Amino acid sequence: MSTITAILEPHADGTLHLPLPTAFSGGKVKVTATLAVAEESGETVRATPEMVRQRMAALARLRELNPFREVVDPVAWQREIREDRPAPGRD
């Protein structure tokens, strides 16, 4: 068992994301959470070297997959995949 104390900022959709140590990857993790409004301390939490290594490895895997390799014209591709609607007052 490990105790982690963290102040997390909720994402726009209301979810919280807690980075886990590598010892907990690959299986289920039991989490007990206590929610309270955090005091503004001005304190910044920095990523640990292990977290940075994990993120860099994930980005390297993403580069290897090259998910956008078929996109020749990014502007045209973006227009094709968007589901935009006309803005009001802009006929």
Image: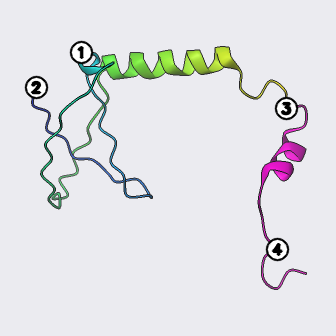
Q: Is residue 79 magenta?
A: yes
| CA–CA distance in space, label 4 to label 1 | 49 Å
Image spot of residue 42 (x, y percent): 23, 51
Q: Quadrant of residue 46?
A: top left
Q: Residues within 10 Å of mark 2 (few under 14, many from 20)?
A: few
Whether residue 26 is situated above or below residue 74 in the rendered picture:
above
Residue at numbered disc 1: 23
Residue corresponding to mark 4: 86
Q: How far apart are marks 3 and 2 (CA)?
A: 44 Å
Task: Tell me if mark 4 has few (under 14), some (14-19) or many (20+) residues whose alpha carbon lies within 10 angstroms of its own.
Answer: few
Q: Distance between the residues labelled 4 and 3?
A: 25 Å
Magenta-tinted stretch: 71-91
Q: Is residue 68 above or below residue 39?
A: above
From the viewer's perspective, is residue 56 above or below residue 88? above
- Looking at the image, do the residues carrying marks 1 and 2 touch, with CB atoms under 8 Å apart? yes
Q: Distance between the residues labelled 1 and 3?
A: 38 Å
Q: Earlier in the sequence, mark 4 or mark 1?
A: 1
Residue contact between numbered discs 1 and 3, judged by CB atoms under 8 Å: no
Labels 4 and 3: the sequence-earlier one: 3
Instruction: Name the disc covering residue 2, or none.
Output: 2
Q: Which amino acid does label 3 sit on?
A: Val
Amino acid identity at mark 1: Ala
Q: Residue 71 carries which label?
A: 3
| Residue 47 in picture, x, y percent from top left | 32, 29
